[in-house]
């Protein structure tokens, strides 16, 4: 077999051929691009031309429609002109007829004018005559007007005088009525004054009798005070003599000695401390402190009376109380103090009288009625205590105090359990002064103490404020242990 021969390839030629091919391809592509841009430009111009043609067509259609409308308008105008010409012809014929009628009427009016001229001349003469008559009438009317004006002026003056007279008459009538009313009021006032004068005379007579009685009572009181002073002087003299004799007896007998550690005999003081009062006036002192707390007596008065009572000098306390009320009606508070002191001094009848006067006063304070009822209860006068307690219960400010008295009365009549229960419930009431709650707990502690219930007594006493009326409450608690 023959070996195949491979033709030799000229690379340079091939390279040139390829380069030429690429150049031609680029030229073709560039021409294609240019042709495409030209086609696009032609397409755009074609579209623009088409839009222009469409717009022109639309304008032509609009023009045709306007032309048709204008033709129709011209036809209508022509018809209207024809009708107007016909109307003008009819109007011209009517004007001719009117002209003929007007000429006829003008001739008739001329004849009427001549008649009117003659009538006017006649009327003018009549008017001239009427003018003369009217002038004469005007002069007469002027005189009548002046006469009326004068009459009106006189009528106004007369009206003013009548109004003034009417006002004066009404004022006189009103003044007369007022004077009559004042006379009637004065007459009533005189009647009232006469009645009051009579009452005043009667009151003066009564006051004169009361003054005479007061003077006699004052004289009797002065005599009594003088007698009490003499009695007190004699008592002091006897006390000093007795003290001297006791000292002499003590020297003769001698003092007992302390043997084998046994204490010396100590006299009983009923719970009172040495150098202090025996406690005879302890209730009176507590009452005075309560009265001072309620400002029914002044602090100075309370101190002066209490000082006399602490020195166990009831007569001096009575003198102090009497001196504070001398020359005036004794207040209920001082009457209560008199009753408290006299009761402890043994004059029960006089004490009851003063308690009665203090508690039955019209406007007696709740604390006065409470203390009076409590004193009656301590004297075992249950009926009198119940009556005063009922007066106290009617007072809005005495509800708690009346409950305390009711509980104490239950205890005294043998129902101590009901008394403590009622008093415990009374302490729960609200709206009363602090000292009334202290008094309730103080009396409740006393109830438990009298029943030997020490724990409950101490519990009640501890709720009491250690103020002036209950200053010894701490000592009471200590004495229970």
Image: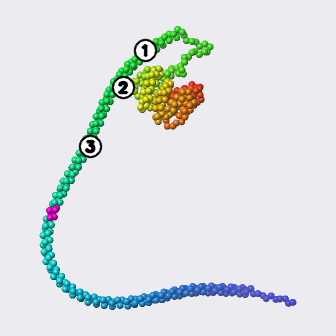
In the image shown, does 240 or 405 lie closer to the viewer? Answer: 405
Q: Is residue 128 above or below residue 372?
A: below
The N terminus, quarter of image = bottom right
Q: Residue placed at 40% from the left, 89% from the top?
A: 77
In front of the other: label 2 or label 1? 2
Residue farthest to the right?
1
Whether 209 is drawn above or below 394: the answer is: above
* 10 Å crowding of disc 1: few (<14), some (14-19), many (20+): few
Q: Main secondary structure of the magenta part?
A: helix
Q: Residues within 10 Å of mark 3 (few under 14, many from 20)?
A: few
Q: Disc 1 versus disc 3: distance between alpha carbons?
A: 75 Å
Q: SS of the residue at dot 1?
A: helix
Q: Which mark is residue 115?
A: none
Around disc 2, counting alpha carbons within 10 Å, would you say few (fewer than 14), some (14 to 19), or many (20 or more)? few
Label 2 sits on residue: 327
Q: Position of residue 366 (x, y in %)?
A: 46, 32
Q: Is residue 345 magenta?
A: no
Of the two numbered discs 2 and 1 on the same chain, state the one appearing first in sequence: 1
Q: Position of residue 3 (x, y in %)?
A: 84, 88
**Regarding mark 3 in the picture, which secondary structure is present there?**
helix
- The residue indicated by pointer 1 is 234
- At x 37%, y 89%, the residue is 83
Q: Residue at x 15, y 66 (%)?
A: 141
Q: Which residues are magenta?
A: 144-149
> How far from the left and from the top, in percent, is residue 375?
48, 26
- Of callouts 1 and 3, the N-terminal one: 3
| Residue at (51% x, 88% y) in the render | 57
Residue position for label 3: 181
* Whether residue 70 is situated above or below residue 268 in the rendered picture: below
* Position in image of residue 123 (x %, y %): 15, 78
Count of numbered tags: 3
């Amino acid at each position: 077999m023959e070996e195949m021969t491979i033709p030799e390839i000229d690379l340079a030629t091939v390279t040139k051929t390829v380069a030429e091919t690429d150049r031609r391809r680029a030229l073709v592509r560039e021409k294609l691009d240019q042709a495409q841009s030209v086609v696009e430009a032609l397409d755009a111009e074609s579209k623009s031309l088409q839009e222009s043609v469409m717009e022109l067509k639309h304008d032509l259609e609009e023009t045709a429609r306007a032309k048709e409308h204008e033709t129709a308008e011209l036809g209508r105008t022509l018809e209207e002109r024809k009708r107007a010409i016909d109307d003008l012809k009819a109007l011209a014929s009517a004007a001719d007829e009117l002209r003929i009628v007007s000429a006829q009427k003008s001739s008739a009016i001329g004849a009427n004018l001549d008649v009117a001229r003659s009538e006017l001349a006649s009327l003018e003469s009549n008017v001239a005559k009427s003018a003369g008559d009217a002038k004469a009438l005007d002069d007469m009317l002027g005189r009548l007007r002046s006469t009326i004006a004068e009459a009106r002026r006189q009528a106004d003056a007369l009206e003013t005088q009548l109004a003034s007279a009417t006002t004066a008459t009404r004022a006189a009538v009103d003044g007369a009525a007022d004077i009559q009313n004042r006379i009637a009021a004065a007459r009533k006032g005189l009647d009232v004054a006469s009645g009051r004068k009579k009452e005043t005379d009667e009151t003066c007579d009564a006051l004169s009798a009361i003054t005479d009685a007061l003077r006699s009572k004052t004289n009797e009181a002065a005599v009594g005070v003088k007698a009490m002073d003499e009695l007190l002087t004699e008592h002091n003299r006897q006390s000093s003599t007795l003290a001297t004799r006791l000292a002499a007896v003590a020297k003769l007998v001698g003092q007992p000695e302390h043997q084998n550690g046994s204490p010396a005999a100590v006299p009983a003081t009923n719970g009172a401390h040495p150098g202090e009062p025996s406690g005879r006036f302890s209730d009176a002192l507590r009452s005075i402190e309560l009265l001072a707390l309620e400002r029914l007596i002044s602090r100075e008065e309370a101190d002066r009376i209490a000082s006399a009572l602490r020195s166990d000098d009831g007569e001096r306390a009575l003198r102090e109380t009497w001196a504070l009320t001398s020359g005036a009606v004794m207040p209920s508070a001082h009457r209560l103090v008199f009753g408290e002191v006299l009761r402890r001094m043994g004059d029960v009848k006089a004490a009851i009288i003063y308690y009665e006067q203090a508690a039955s006063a019209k406007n007696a304070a709740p604390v006065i009625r409470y203390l009076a009822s409590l004193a009656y209860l301590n004297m075992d006068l249950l009926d009198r205590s119940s009556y005063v307690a009922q007066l106290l219960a009617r007072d809005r400010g005495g509800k708690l105090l009346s409950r305390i008295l009711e509980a104490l009365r239950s205890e005294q009549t043998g129902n101590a359990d009901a008394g403590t229960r009622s008093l415990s419930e009374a302490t729960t009431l609200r709206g009363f002064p602090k000292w009334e709650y202290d008094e309730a707990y103080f009396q409740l502690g006393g109830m438990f103490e009298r029943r030997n219930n020490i724990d409950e007594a101490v519990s009640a006493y501890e709720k009491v404020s250690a103020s002036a009326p209950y200053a010894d409450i701490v000592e009471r608690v200590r004495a229970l242990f």
